[in-house]
């Protein structure tokens, strides 16, 4: 495949571009994920709460692609936090996916009001120590939450999957990750398509580079070193979003895109999610 990999802090290679399946209904997930696999994606990002692990698993099994060429991520839902509940939730996700391990298991949100994420992390460490997940990480963690895992845990998170797009560029959090060997994975990398992709500057940079606005945004992420997981259910867009390795933004383009950062969070502040 043409997709480069990021080497995680435990040596595991993760494709820098993958396919996200949030809001894809379970009965559509098999066909949609199959379209993505046919287009060349090998990394799939799902979660227990997305309700589509079964359809995703069917697509993986039906594709005939060797397991070792796939990179599958799923996530622990908030109501399953706690040591024993996490271990049970992981078994349930594997059963729905039809897999004996995932490549990356994430705590979906810190859910700080529950204050169970350190305990849940110990369960992920157990899963990892038993060789049942190739890497473990988190999602939507602020630096204060990450610091508790670094201080109280025995394995550093490999990844923090966070909301990140040109108008919400998360420079401070990316710097914290870089300082601690945590890979930055961008969710809603296209800003969910609304608004951001209509920015005139993206059309201009697209014309200059022979690319679409979405492709310009994905290049920006890749050149910053982010892992990206764009989502689409439209086959032409699924193919468009992985066709981003034939051009490069120059320094001036990257500076122009830095000008879009407006601190424009679309999703919830992780402090408020439980
Ligand atoms: P996204 O930024 O990937 O945008 C997807 C939307 O953008 C599509 O539904 C479509 O409307 C539009 N789009 C996609 N490709 C396009 C193209 N080429 N041209 C024009 N429009 C296009 O948004 P997302 O789905 O929110 O995020 C991607 C993935 O990130 C999710 O599927 C999920 O796997 C993950 N995610 C994780 C969390 C988390 O809390 N960890 C939260 C949200 C999303």
Image (cartoon, grey):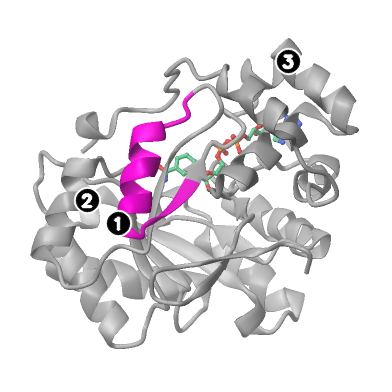
Res 44 quadrant in image: bottom right
Which of 25/238 is in front? 238
Q: Which residue is drawn at 87% across and 25% down?
A: 208
Q: Which tag, 2 or 1, sits closer to the chain's start?
A: 2
Q: Is mark 1 on a helix, strand or loop?
A: helix
Q: Which mark is residue 180?
A: 1
Q: Residue 201 carries which label?
A: 3
Q: Do the residues labelled 3 and 2 touch (CB within 8 Å)?
A: no
Q: Position of residue 79 (x, y in %)?
A: 22, 50
Q: Are marks 2 and 1 in contact (CB under 8 Å)?
A: yes
Which of 68/35 is in front? 68
Q: Where is residue 204 in the image (x, y as percent from the top left)?
A: 81, 17
Which of 214/99 is in front? 214
Q: Which tag, 3 or 2, sits closer to the chain's start?
A: 2
Classify the position of the C terminus by image quarter.
top left
Tag count: 3
On screen, residue 219 above or below 184: above
On screen, residue 76 above or below 168: below
Left/right of residue 57 with respect to residue 158 in the rendered view:
right
């Amino acid at each position: 495949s043409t997709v480069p990999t990021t080497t995680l802090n435990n040596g595991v290679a993760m494709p820098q571009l993958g396919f996200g399946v949030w809001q894809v209904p379970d009965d559509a997930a098999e066909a949609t994920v199959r379209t993505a696999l046919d287009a060349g994606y090998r990394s799939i990002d799902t979660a227990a709460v997305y309700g589509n692990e079964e359809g995703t698993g069917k697509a993986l099994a039906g594709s005939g692609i060797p397991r070792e060429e796939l990179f599958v991520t799923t996530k622990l839902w908030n109501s399953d936090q706690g040591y024993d509940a996490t271990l049970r939730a992981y078994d349930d996700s594997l059963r729905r996916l039809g897999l004996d391990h995932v490549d990356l298991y994430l705590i979906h949100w810190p859910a700080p009001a529950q204050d169970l994420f350190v305990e849940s992390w110990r369960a992920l460490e157990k899963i990892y120590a038993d060789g049942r997940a190739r890497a473990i990480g988190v999602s939507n963690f602020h630096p204060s939450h990450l610091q508790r895992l670094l201080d109280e845990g025995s394995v550093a998170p490999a990844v923090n999957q966070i909301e990140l797009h040109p108008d919400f560029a998360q420079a401070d959090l990316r710097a914290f990750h870089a300082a601690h060997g945590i890979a930055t994975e961008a969710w809603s990398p296209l800003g969910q398509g609304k608004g951001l992709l209509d920015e005139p500057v993206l059309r201009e940079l697209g014309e200059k580079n022979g690319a679409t606005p979405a492709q310009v945004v994905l290049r920006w992420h890749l050149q910053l070193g982010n892992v990206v997981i764009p989502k689409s259910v439209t086959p032409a867009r699924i193919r468009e979003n992985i066709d981003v390795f034939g051009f490069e933004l120059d320094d001036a383009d990257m500076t122009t895109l830095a000008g879009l950062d407006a601190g424009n969070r679309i999703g919830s502040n992780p402090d408020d999610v439980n």
